[in-house]
């Protein structure tokens, strides 16, 4: 059965495409290493991938501790300090009870009350990325996108999805009052699909964080976001349909909360709230089949909190194992011809100096055959294979180098990037 769990980007179109005249020159940039890949397309890297995700993309040419009026219908909230990597501190608001509502009961508000209270905490996130086209006659395109985000602190920390801001050169945040700010990425993590942004603002309305461990199936929830990239502040309602769904979203294995609230392209990074007005999830995926309805997914807020704290303190998520390499997937004959290789698969693009891969003798141009017991056919296989290991573990990696199968023992280091 075809896997259709995906981020569901849609509506790609061109704007501002400025092709450069053909130069007639071939690929350049020799790759080092024995049996390696002789060359890469001009500009380097793989061809731009068409992304499909809730953070609708369109292809186009602290640290002060302040009191604020945050709202929680479930019995108050409490602030807790989080240290940032630059030595300051910021405050996030946690529901004091740590609980979760099961209905619009006397402990919660009406859905209209909840929507009115939480909507100012949800923002529109728009991005721009310049992409070089190496496959026709050259030139550049501007990849524009739109998603959502949730304000975490009064002084401008905002959480969104990794796939919303991935590769963006410019990020703009639009608040509920239509004011706009340029955002910077504090840190991001592809595995959890979380990114932390910062804008230069004060007096914002942060979300009150709930406790996703206390959420129960059947709870009424509302999703707030920017569907279709143009409808910021849209509210839809539903229930929590299931918990701890282990699914693969475009190759990334995740444990998510399922909801029946309507989720559309552009909702990625938006908030899923309970009837106490507490944030219990960050929307990030849906089921893409046109015959399926009410199958949306969100990252549990407790997962988000752990990742955000690491991003604040370190700029990356600690404890993630890494081989110490960058890789390229050669998935079709055309790409294989461009890189000058005869086999499809995952190739080592570069080896980090001082890494476990370098110590084990891995070289640029090696084709990765397996990691442990996991056969490798895509970069997602590499990522997912490493999830079962810890930093410091020794893993057996088989590579194909010049048609010779070589087994390497690699000591895993710590991943310090997204």
Image (tube, rainbow, N blue to C red):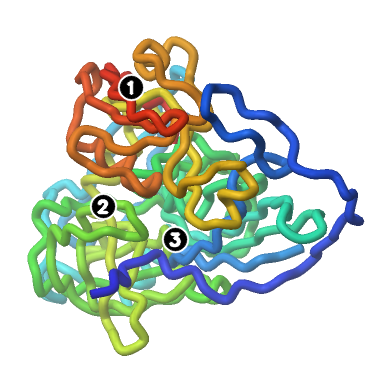
Q: Position of residue 160 (x, y in %)?
A: 43, 52
Q: Using the numbered discs, state the Cα–Cα distance from disc 2 to disc 3 in whole angstroms.
A: 26 Å
What residue did someone put label 1 on? 414
Q: Secondary structure at mark 1?
A: strand
Please give the name of the residue rendered at 64% of the width and 48% of the height, measured from the top-left corner.
338
Q: What residue did someone put label 3 on?
A: 122
N-terminal of the two: label 2 or label 3?
A: 3
Q: Tell me where residue 58 sits by quadrant.
A: bottom right
Residue 227, percent from left and from top:
48, 74
Closer to viewer: mark 3 or mark 1? 1
Q: Residues within 10 Å of mark 1 (few under 14, many from 20)?
A: some
* Residue 255, percent from left and from top: 20, 54
Q: Secondary structure at mark 3?
A: strand
Question: Residue visible at 42% across and 58% down?
Answer: 269
- In the image, 68 versus 166, the foreground residue is 166
Give the side of residue 253 with respect to residue 177, left or right.
Answer: left
The mark lying in front, picked from 2 and 3, is: 2
* Residue located at (53% from left, 40% from top): 198
Q: Residues within 10 Å of mark 3 (few under 14, many from 20)?
A: many
Q: Note whether residue 318 is visible.
A: yes
Specify which label sits upstream in the sequence, 2 or 1.
2
Where is residue 139? Give x, y as percent: 81, 54
User: Distance between the Cα atoms at labels 3 and 1?
Assistant: 33 Å
Q: Nearer the viewer, residue 165 or 291?
A: 291
Count of labels in the image: 3
Q: CA distance from mark 2 to mark 1?
A: 20 Å
Indicate whether 340 appears above or below 294: above
Q: Is residue 320 left or right of residue 166?
A: left
Circle number at residue 253: 2
Quarter occupied by the N terminus: bottom left
Secondary structure at numbered mark 2 = strand
């Amino acid at each position: 059965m075809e896997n259709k769990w995906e981020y569901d980007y849609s509506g790609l179109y061109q704007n501002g495409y400025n092709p450069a005249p053909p130069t007639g020159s071939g690929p350049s940039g020799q790759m080092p290493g024995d049996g390696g890949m002789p060359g890469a397309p001009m500009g380097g890297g793989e061809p731009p991938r068409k992304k499909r995700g809730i953070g609708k993309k369109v292809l186009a040419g602290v640290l002060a501790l302040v009191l604020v009026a945050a709202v929680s219908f479930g019995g108050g909230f409490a602030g807790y300090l989080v240290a940032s990597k630059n030595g300051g501190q910021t405050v996030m608001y946690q529901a004091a009870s740590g609980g979760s509502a099961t209905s619009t009961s006397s402990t919660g508000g009406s859905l209209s009350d909840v929507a009115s209270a939480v909507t100012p905490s949800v923002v529109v996130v728009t991005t721009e990325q310049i992409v070089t086209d190496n496959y026709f006659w050259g030139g550049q395109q501007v990849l524009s996108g739109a998603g959502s985000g949730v304000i975490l602190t009064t002084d401008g920390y905002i959480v969104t999805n990794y796939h919303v801001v991935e590769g963006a050169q410019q990020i703009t945040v639009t608040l509920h009052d239509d004011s706009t700010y340029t955002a910077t990425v504090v840190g991001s993590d592809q595995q959890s699909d979380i990114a932390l942004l910062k804008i230069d603002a004060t007096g914002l309305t942060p979300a009150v964080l709930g406790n996703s461990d206390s959420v129960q199936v059947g709870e009424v929830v509302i999703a707030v976001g920017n569907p279709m990239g143009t409808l910021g502040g849209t509210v839809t309602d539903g229930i929590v349909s299931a918990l701890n769904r282990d699914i693969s979203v475009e190759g990334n294995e995740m444990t998510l909360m399922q909801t029946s609230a309507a989720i559309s392209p552009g909702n990625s990074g938006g908030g899923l709230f309970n009837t106490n007005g507490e944030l219990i999830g960050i929307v990030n995926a849906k089921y893409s089949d046109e015959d399926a309805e009410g199958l949306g997914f969100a990252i549990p807020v407790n997962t988000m909190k752990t990742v955000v704290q690491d991003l604040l303190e370190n700029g990356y998520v600690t404890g993630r194992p890494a081989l110490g390499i960058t890789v390229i997937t050669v998935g079709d004959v055309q790409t294989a011809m461009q890189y000058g290789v005869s086999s499809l698969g995952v190739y080592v693009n570069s080896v980090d100096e001082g890494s476990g891969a370098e110590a084990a003798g891995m070289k640029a141009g090696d084709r990765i055959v397996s990691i442990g017991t996991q056969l490798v056919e895509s970069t997602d296989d590499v990522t997912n294979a490493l999830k079962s290991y810890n930093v410091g573990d020794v893993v057996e990696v088989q590579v194909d180098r010049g048609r010779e199968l070589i087994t390497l023992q690699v000591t895993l280091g710590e991943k310090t990037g997204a």
